[in-house]
Image (spheres, coloured by chain):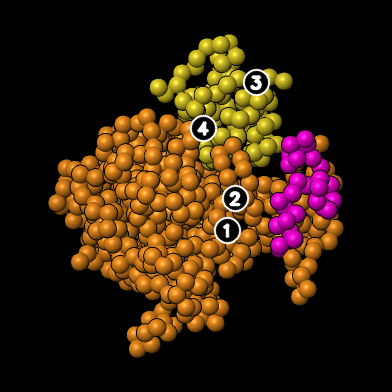
């Protein structure tokens, strides 16, 4: 399963985001109210476990995690060993 | 003495026309004269469409400069503003619009199903879409004379969870709002040079401190949008770069910044006061916050249900000088007076636990359209019978400690706080009972460790049909259409029969104990599960 599909599955099944399966990948997840701040931390924990990456606190930023498409790009950059950008 | 909240804006626009009034982080703020003009434009638009003094104007807007302009625009018509949570299911938004008899709505271009539901519930309702910072998109129109509300007029109606399943509208007058704002401005010495954070959503009463406190002082308000609020790193970034001097939020926001946003590495020379309210701050975490902040930062725990606004406060002693295991809610605010009583409403001896009753200038008028609930929530002021005043029953159990501060000991009823929001367990239960096939329903709150620390979670128990695959999913879909997301239980468990107390009531203690152990270990019938133990959709 690709990153986007497993993310959608996680949002639908674990965070119970109603329209996760069909959601626009560019929809701003927290801005739109789809997930709250605690769920955001659950997304990060999921990314670390599911994709074997390590997310530094300084990387938990809108530019990395704002939308499904940003998260996919972030995970792929991390897997490729790049540093997608942090706050410090 | 200002006649109303509106007087605060007019005064600051006259005294500090060019000073920055409100803006988003990193953006050019609107000045006080700009805020005055933009809000007059919104007020004129509303007035032209028939909004009159005493009406209710709904707000369905993201946290933004336009939302602040909208609040002032509504107030300047003499109407009360009614902010609606944008995460509300459309049905709940429409219920609120009908309940308060909404006569106009201010919304954003991106809204949505909720606006349509409100339009359907209130045919012909004028809807103004606000967009574009500052200008708000309202065409300039000649502003006729606007009414001057006074202290007796309603300023806002805030809807909170209602135990019977219908949200309750807390009515707050200009006088009550002013009593709080003037107390807070004096107590925290708000000045024009201050920069206040606007962290809470508008439907949460914490927002009234920053909105109106900043205006009273002629200070600058930094509006933190939903994204900035929810990413701790972005919140901390705004705290530093916007040089915020007075911060106010729920404890959760501060706890997350300490844990994940390297608060102690930030340069915060402007920060002088940090206020928090809405839920209990765990004492150890509060001590950690103190160590992460500049040592001379003053911290205060503010307490009060929406119905009283803030009625007690506690100044946190300097770091390293206090070790108490719990954070007290402090002493009565200077404009309020509390008394602790037993179930027969007799004052308890000093040091004993009882319900806190409050008298003072910040009390709500009552619940919109619900004289019965209003009557239940107040009692005649038996302490001063000659004054024929009233006391508000907070439903909170407190105890006065030897140092004079109140310690908080929980609720007398079934209200809990989830993510800082009030949830009447009865609202969730009645939504469950409306679902087809549900015979009985009970919801309990439990404390659990999550990735963000210890949090309150809801666990629902239902009897009736189920637990076949898809049943939990159907119930969740039903709940999502009727209640806010934070009210949807983390778990739904199916019971063949409910445990009962000797008096035949649902035994909530037993349910709480069941909720605290993993589902497989409880006597609950097995529900469809994934290895994580609480996923509804995997098996279908």
**What residue is pinned by disc 2?**
B456
Would residue B507 be found to the left or right of residue B108 on screen? Answer: right
Between circles 4 and 3, the one closer to the viewer is 3
Q: Residue at x 32, y 38 (%)?
A: B294
Of residues B392 and B520, which is closer to you in this image?
B520
Mark number displayed over residue A28: 4
Q: Position of residue B308 (x, y in %)?
A: 41, 66
Do discs 4 and 3 belong to a common subunit? yes
Q: Residue at x 28, y 43 (%)?
A: B296
Q: Position of residue B343 (x, y in %)?
A: 56, 78
Report if the CB atoms under discs 4 and 3 are less than 8 Å apart: no
Report if the CB atoms under discs 2 and 3 are less than 8 Å apart: no
Say which chain is orange.
Answer: B
Between circles 1 and 4, the one closer to the viewer is 1
Q: Secondary structure at mark 4?
A: loop
Q: Earlier in the sequence, mark 1 or mark 2?
A: 1
Report if the CB atoms under discs 1 and 2 are less than 8 Å apart: yes
Within 10 Å of disc 2 (Cα), the crowding (few <14, some 14-19, many 20+) is some
Do discs 3 and 1 belong to a common subunit? no
Q: Residue at x 50, y 47 (%)?
A: B86
**What residue is pinned by disc 3?**
A51
Between circles 2 and 3, the one closer to the viewer is 2
- Residue at the outermost left position: B15
Of residues B255 and B490, which is closer to you in this image?
B255
Q: In the rendered view, would you say B436 is above or below B530?
A: below
Q: Secondary structure at mark 3?
A: helix
Mark 1–mark 4 Cα distance, whole angstroms, equals 29 Å
Query: Would residue B140 be visible to someone looking at this image?
Result: no
Looking at the rendering, in which quadrant would you find the N terminus of chain B?
Answer: bottom left
Do discs 4 and 2 belong to a common subunit? no
**What residue is pinned by disc 1?**
B416
């Amino acid at each position: 399963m690709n990153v986007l599909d497993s993310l959608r599955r996680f949002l639908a099944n674990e965070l119970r985001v109603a329209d996760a399966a069909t959601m626009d990948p560019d929809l701003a997840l927290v801005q739109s109210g789809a997930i709250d701040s605690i769920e955001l931390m659950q997304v990060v924990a999921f990314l670390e476990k599911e994709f074997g990456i390590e997310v530094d606190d300084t990387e938990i930023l809108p530019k990395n995690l704002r939308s499904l498409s940003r998260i996919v790009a972030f995970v792929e950059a991390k897997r490729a060993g790049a540093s997608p950008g942090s706050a410090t | 003495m200002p006649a109303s909240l509106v007087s605060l804006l007019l005064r600051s626009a006259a005294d500090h026309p060019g000073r920055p009034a409100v803006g988003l982080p990193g953006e050019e703020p609107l000045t006080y004269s700009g805020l005055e003009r933009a809000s007059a434009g919104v007020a004129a638009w509303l007035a032209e469409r028939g909004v009159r003094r005493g009406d209710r104007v709904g707000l369905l807007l993201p946290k933004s400069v336009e939302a602040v302009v909208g609040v002032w625009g509504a107030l300047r018509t003499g109407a009360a503003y009614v902010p609606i949570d944008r995460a509300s299911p459309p049905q709940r938004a429409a219920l609120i619009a009908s309940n308060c008899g909404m006569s106009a709505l201010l919304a954003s271009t991106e809204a949505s199903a909720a606006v349509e539901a409100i339009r359907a519930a209130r045919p012909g309702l004028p809807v103004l879409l606000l967009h574009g910072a500052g200008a708000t998109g309202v065409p300039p129109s000649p502003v006729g004379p606007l009414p001057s509300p006074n202290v007796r007029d309603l300023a806002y109606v805030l809807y909170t969870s209602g135990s019977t399943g219908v949200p309750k509208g807390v009515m707050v007058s200009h006088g009550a709002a002013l009593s709080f704002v003037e107390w807070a401005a004096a107590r925290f010495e708000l000045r024009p040079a201050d920069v206040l954070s606007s962290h809470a959503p508008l439907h949460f009463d914490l927002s009234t401190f920053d909105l109106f406190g900043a205006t009273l002082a002629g200070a600058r308000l930094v509006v933190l949008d939903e994204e900035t609020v929810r990413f701790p790193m972005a919140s901390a970034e705004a705290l530093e770069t916007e040089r915020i001097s007075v911060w106010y939020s729920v404890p959760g926001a501060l706890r997350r910044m300490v844990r994940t946003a390297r608060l102690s590495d930030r340069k915060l020379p402007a920060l002088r006061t940090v206020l928090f309210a809405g839920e209990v701050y765990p004492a150890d975490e509060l001590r950690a916050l103190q160590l992460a902040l500049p040592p001379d930062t003053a911290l205060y725990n503010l307490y009060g249900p929406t119905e009283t606004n803030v009625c007690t406060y506690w100044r946190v002693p300097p770091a390293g000088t206090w070790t108490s295991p719990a954070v007290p809610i402090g002493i009565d605010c200077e404009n309020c007076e509390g008394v602790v009583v037993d179930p027969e409403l007799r004052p308890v001896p000093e040091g004993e636990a009882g319900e806190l009753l409050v008298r003072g200038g910040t009390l709500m008028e009552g619940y919109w359209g619900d004289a019965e609930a209003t009557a239940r929530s107040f009692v005649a002021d038996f302490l001063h019978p000659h004054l024929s005043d009233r006391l508000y029953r907070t439903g909170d159990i407190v105890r006065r400690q030897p140092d004079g501060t109140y310690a908080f000991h929980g609720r007398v009823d079934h209200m809990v706080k989830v993510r800082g929001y009030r949830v009447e367990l009865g609202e969730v239960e009645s939504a469950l009972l409306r679902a087809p096939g549900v015979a009985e329903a009970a919801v309990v709150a439990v404390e659990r460790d999550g990735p963000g620390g210890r949090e309150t979670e809801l666990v629902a128990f239902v009897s009736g049909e189920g637990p076949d695959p898809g049943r939990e999913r159907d119930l969740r879909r039903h709940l999502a259409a009727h209640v806010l997301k934070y009210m949807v239980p983390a778990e739904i468990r199916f019971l063949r029969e409910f445990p009962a107390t000797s008096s035949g009531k649902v035994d909530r203690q037993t349910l709480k104990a069941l909720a605290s152990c993993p589902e497989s270990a409880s006597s609950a019938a097995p529900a469809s599960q994934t290895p994580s133990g609480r996923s509804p959709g995997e098996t279908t």
